[in-house]
């Protein structure tokens, strides 16, 4: 069953077209990397799916619901969890408060408090450093710890899909490795669907899964990361001059 | 000496509560709400029957205080939320300048609505008259009211901070104040948080109306404006969006006003406020981001 | 000071890739010309109508045009909202009062003035010029300090400046008469001086907008980082605009004094600040045309509402609408305009003749 279906999305900022007629869909449990050079429109696409920036045209559906033009909080409540570029922790809140923000959307369900507590324990188990500093200010964490915090924060909402925009941004390579190890482990534990944006295709090729390559606001390649990684097409997509 | 401290604290209390009302709304929607002062005025006039007499006919003023106080707070919160629903909701994506002017226009509407019903003559009222007797503390004779003002402010501040730290709603509001779109991506409902901020801010306006109304014994359409000018300034030098900063700066301004009143030579006293404003400009020059810079408040140049 | 800004532009105005300065002037001159024609047309109609109250109302409009154009010079080009400019209007108005009131009256009302000023009595146009100069110098002094700030801090600092000026003028008994009215300023009832001032301020605004400092300032407004990186001294460009706009505000203040004959500090405080700012924002903050059209439209609206308020007579009974309804309607209409057009009625465009605007578009693409 397709979890996320994006069809023919175009995004404009004034006269500038950031994304032009992009379509793709994702299945349950799939891991998809969206890669491409700077300015390819990856982040714009993410923000539009999350409901933060409106699309000029096209449709998006998530777990069967049409979410085009819906508010970000409604989309989040359907189980779409977004970790935006630059992490965006709530710096003045404590780590535990950061984790708890997203549990509010279940507040109408019975026994949500108990479940939130279990959820919290599970996140602390995955990221022990967060438990250690649970009452510390989130803004004081290092970049890698903040990345763990926002992944944990996304998990707290019990999502069906987590979208992460550039998890490696500003992190040392070995820290990035740790972050990815966690992600992969979580995915198999919880049967998560993962949508990951990265500038470089290297990580996708290393981990495997599907890769969507964007350039100039359009999808230029869509296929298995490992087989694409060795192709000449990917070189052309990054370094080619066919557009400008 | 003690008298000066209490004067400063009670004036600072008003400024701090006013600044807090502005900072709460600024935090969640980057709106500098110029209508706040008029909400304060509305709260006090809501207790009067429309009339043009100088002696006000207080219809709700006869209520015992335990009913009067909640009534005024609810009126403030209600009006404030109504402003949000009718007006500010349509300006969520507008620039701060546009929002500011819209809030001014709204304040204008509220002010002239009051003017239409009550005329511009200040009216004498007696709210909570039992508070005007003096009390003796540490050898200083203080009006009971001043004491109550300070105590009430402290209670409000503690209550608000507990509310923000201990409740789910407070958590969502703090998260939204820091990064609104991220909070929404975590399922925090934008309308609910913004309406909550307006309700709190309106209730604070009600509290100011009660305190100021009983202090001066008059209901004046202009009463909000005089406090709000200082409150705006307090909000900014406190660090826009920072609630603690707003409170701190409010007390600082109140203190500075009172101290200057005492310290300045007699000839210069009428110009006290000019010195206070000069000090404000100096503070801004050295700390343009405010005394306590709020995180996540990116300045637009 | 005012004449210097309309003088020919410096030769090194723009780099070679952009159009030469005179071609820029030629391309944009239609805006001030058309706006001036609009002013002249209104003035002409007023004179033809021969109605005295209407004459006075139109004089008010032209005074506000001067003030709002003065605001535009700083706010429109820098993008920094200033709440303080009416302070310069206050200074200009009092300066005009000091310079034109009959010395005998002055000695009793304002004994604290220096001797030479007590004895001075100038014609209104000279006093207006000096008032503008005085306000411009004051703006230069305040600007030196304030222009280091930006964003909301700058806005609130200008607010503090306004409050400071108001406090001083409200309390300096010997020099300003404190809060009581200063009367005896010669009243000028013909419309032409006001027409002249409005048109002069429009051309000053245009001259500044296409000058090196004006272009740099707008570049800094739209792309602060890029402008700073290409060597734009933002505080300096802001200071130039602040000073010029302060002078224009002072001119407007002097005119206001001469149009009503009385000044009090509270005439030049929050009320006037907000009404002028509203006119600017409703018209379109980023455009000179918006400034002028905002004033004309909102003033027309206010006037129409006043007439409605006063003249609802049915049969023998006159329905005097409650006082305040006019302001309420004005506030509601402003909110509606802003909700529908957040960038103001004109937005960031300028009115030009048809042919030129189409050429401008093609050159942009």
Image (cartoon, coloured by chain):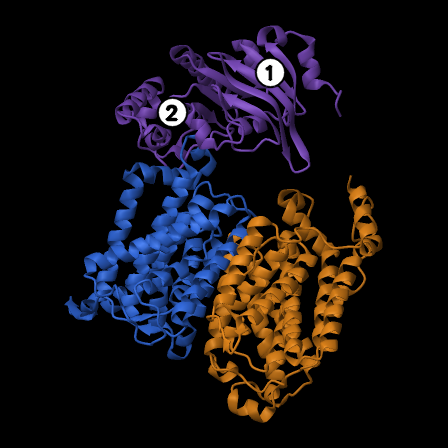
Chain colours: A purple, B blue, C orange
The secondary element bearing badge 1 is classed as: strand
Q: For residue B227, what is the image quadrant?
A: bottom left
Q: Nearer the viewer, residue A133 or B74?
A: B74
Looking at this view, name the residue that lies furthest to the front: C315
Q: Is residue A239 left or right of residue C281?
A: right
Residue B17 in the image: state x and y as whole percent: 34, 56
Marks 1 and 2 belong to one chain: yes
Tell me if residue C364 comes above or below residue A49 in the rendering: below
Q: Answer whether labels 1 and 2 touch (C-beta < 8 Å).
A: no
Mark 1 or mark 2, which has the lower sequence index? 2
Whether residue C255 sits left or right of residue B124 in the image: it is: right
Q: Position of residue A7 (x, y in %)?
A: 59, 21
Q: Is the residue B122 above or below the residue A64 in the image?
A: below
- Residue B126 seen from this side: yes
Instruction: Judge whether residue B185 can be spotted in this image.
Output: no
Is C181 drawn above or below residue A225 in the view shown? below
In this view, the residue in front, B91 or C16, is: B91
Q: Residue at x 48, y 33 (%)?
A: A71
Badge 1: residue crowd in 10 Å (few <14, some 14–19, many ≥20) = many
At a point 38% along the width and 21% down the height, the residue shown is A158
Instruction: Where is residue C9? Give x, y as percent.
Output: 79, 59
Q: Chain of mark 1?
A: A
* On-image quarter of the C terminus of chain A: top right
Query: Mark 2 packing: few (<14 Cα in 10 Å), some, or many (20+)?
Result: many
Is A68 on the left or on the right of A216, as rendered?
Answer: left
Q: Residue, x 39% and y 68% (percent of image)? A: B117
Would you name the residue on which mark 2 appears? A157
Residue B80 lies, in percent from the top left, at 39, 52
State left or right for residue A123 relative to residue C314: left
Q: Which residue is mark 1?
A: A212
């Amino acid at each position: 069953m397709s979890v996320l279906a994006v069809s023919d999305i175009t995004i404009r900022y004034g006269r500038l077209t950031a994304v032009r007629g992009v379509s793709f869909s994702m299945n349950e449990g799939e891991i998809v990397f969206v890669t491409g050079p700077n300015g390819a429109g990856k982040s714009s696409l993410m923000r539009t799916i999350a409901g933060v920036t409106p699309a000029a045209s096209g449709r998006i559906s998530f777990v069967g619901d049409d979410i085009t033009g819906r508010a970000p909080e409604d989309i989040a409540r359907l189980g779409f969890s977004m970790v935006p570029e630059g992490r965006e922790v709530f710096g003045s809140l404590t780590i535990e408060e950061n984790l708890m923000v997203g549990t509010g959307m279940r507040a109408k369900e019975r026994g949500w408090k108990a479940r939130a507590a279990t959820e919290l324990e599970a996140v602390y188990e995955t990221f022990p450093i967060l438990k250690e500093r649970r009452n510390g200010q989130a803004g004081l964490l290092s970049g890698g710890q903040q990345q763990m915090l926002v992944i944990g924060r996304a998990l707290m909402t019990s999502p069906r899909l987590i979208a992460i925009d550039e998890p490696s941004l500003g992190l040392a390579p070995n820290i990035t490795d740790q972050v990815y190890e966690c992600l992969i482990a979580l995915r198999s534990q919880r049967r998560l669907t993962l949508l990951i944006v990265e500038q470089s295709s290297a990580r996708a090729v290393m981990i495997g899964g599907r890769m969507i390559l964007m350039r100039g606001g359009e999808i230029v390649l869509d296929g298995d990361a490992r087989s694409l990684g060795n192709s000449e097409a990917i070189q052309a997509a990054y370094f080619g001059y066919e557009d400008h | 000496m003690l008298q000066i401290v209490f004067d400063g604290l009670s004036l600072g209390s008003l400024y701090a509560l006013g600044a807090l009302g502005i900072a709460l709304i600024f935090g969640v929607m980057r709106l500098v709400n110029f209508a706040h002062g008029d909400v304060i005025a509305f709260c006090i006039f809501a207790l009067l029957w429309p009339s043009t007499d100088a002696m006000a006919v207080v219809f709700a003023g006869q209520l015992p205080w335990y009913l009067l106080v909640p009534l005024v707070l609810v009126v403030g919160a209600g009006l404030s939320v109504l402003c949000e629903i009718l007006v500010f909701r349509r300006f969520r994506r507008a620039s701060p300048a546009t929002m500011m002017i819209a809030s001014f226009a709204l304040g204008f509407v509220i002010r002239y609505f009051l003017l239409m019903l009550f005329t511009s003559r200040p009216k004498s009222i007696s709210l909570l008259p039992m508070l005007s007797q003096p009390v003796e503390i540490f050898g200083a004779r203080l009006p009971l009211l001043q004491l109550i003002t300070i105590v009430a402010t402290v209670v409000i501040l503690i209550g608000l901070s507990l509310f923000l730290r201990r409740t789910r709603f407070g958590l969502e509001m703090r998260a939204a104040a820091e990064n609104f779109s991220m909070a929404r991506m975590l399922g925090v409902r934008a309308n609910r948080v913004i309406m909550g901020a307006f309700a709190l801010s309106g209730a604070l306006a009600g509290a100011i109306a009660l305190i100021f109304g009983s202090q001066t014994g008059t209901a004046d359409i202009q009463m909000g404006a005089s406090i709000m000018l200082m409150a705006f300034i307090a909000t900014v030098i406190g660090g826009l969006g920072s609630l603690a900063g707003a409170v701190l700066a409010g007390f600082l301004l109140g203190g500075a006003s009172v101290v200057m009143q005492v310290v300045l030579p007699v000839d210069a006293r009428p110009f006290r406020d000019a010195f206070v404003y000069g000090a404000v400009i100096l503070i801004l020059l050295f700390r343009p981001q405010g005394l306590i810079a709020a995180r996540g408040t990116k300045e637009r140049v | 000071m005012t004449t210097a800004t309309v003088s020919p532009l410096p030769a090194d105005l723009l780099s070679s890739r952009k159009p030469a300065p005179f071609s820029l002037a030629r391309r944009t001159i239609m805006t001030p010309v058309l706006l001036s024609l609009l002013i002249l047309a209104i003035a002409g109609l007023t004179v033809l109508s021969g109605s005295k109250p209407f004459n006075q109302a139109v004089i008010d409009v032209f005074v506000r045009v001067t003030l709002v154009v003065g605001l535009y010079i700083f706010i429109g080009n820098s993008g920094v909202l200033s709440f303080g400019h009416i302070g310069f209007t206050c200074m200009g108005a009092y300066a005009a009062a000091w310079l034109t009131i009959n010395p005998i009256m002055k000695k009793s009302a304002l004994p604290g003035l220096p001797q030479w000023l007590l004895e001075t009595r100038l014609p209104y146009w000279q006093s207006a010029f000096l008032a503008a100069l005085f306000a411009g110098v004051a703006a230069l002094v305040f600007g030196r300090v304030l222009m280091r700030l930006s964003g909301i801090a700058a806005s609130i600092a200008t607010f503090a400046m306004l409050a400071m000026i108001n406090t001083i003028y409200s309390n300096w008994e010997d020099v300003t008469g404190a809060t009581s009215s200063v009367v005896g300023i010669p009243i000028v009832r013909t419309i032409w001086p006001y027409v002249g001032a409005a048109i002069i301020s429009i051309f000053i605004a245009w001259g500044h907008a296409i000058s090196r400092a004006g272009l740099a300032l707008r570049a800094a407004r739209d792309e602060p980082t890029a402008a700073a990186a290409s060597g734009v001294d933002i505080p300096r460009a802001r200071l130039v605009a602040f000073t010029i706009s302060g002078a224009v505000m002072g001119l407007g203040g002097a005119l206001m004094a001469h149009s009503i004959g009385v000044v009090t500090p509270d005439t030049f405080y929050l009320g006037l600040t907000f009404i002028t700012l509203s006119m600017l924002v409703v018209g379109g903050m980023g455009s000179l045309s918006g400034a002028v059209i905002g004033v004309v439209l909102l003033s027309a609206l206010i006037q129409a509402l006043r007439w409605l308020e006063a003249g609802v007579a049915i049969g023998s009974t006159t329905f005097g609408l409650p006082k305040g309804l006019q302001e309420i309607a004005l506030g509601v209409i402003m909110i509606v305009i802003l909700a529908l057009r957040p960038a103001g009625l004109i937005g960031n465009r300028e009115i030009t003749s048809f042919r030129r605007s189409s050429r401008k578009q093609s050159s942009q693409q």
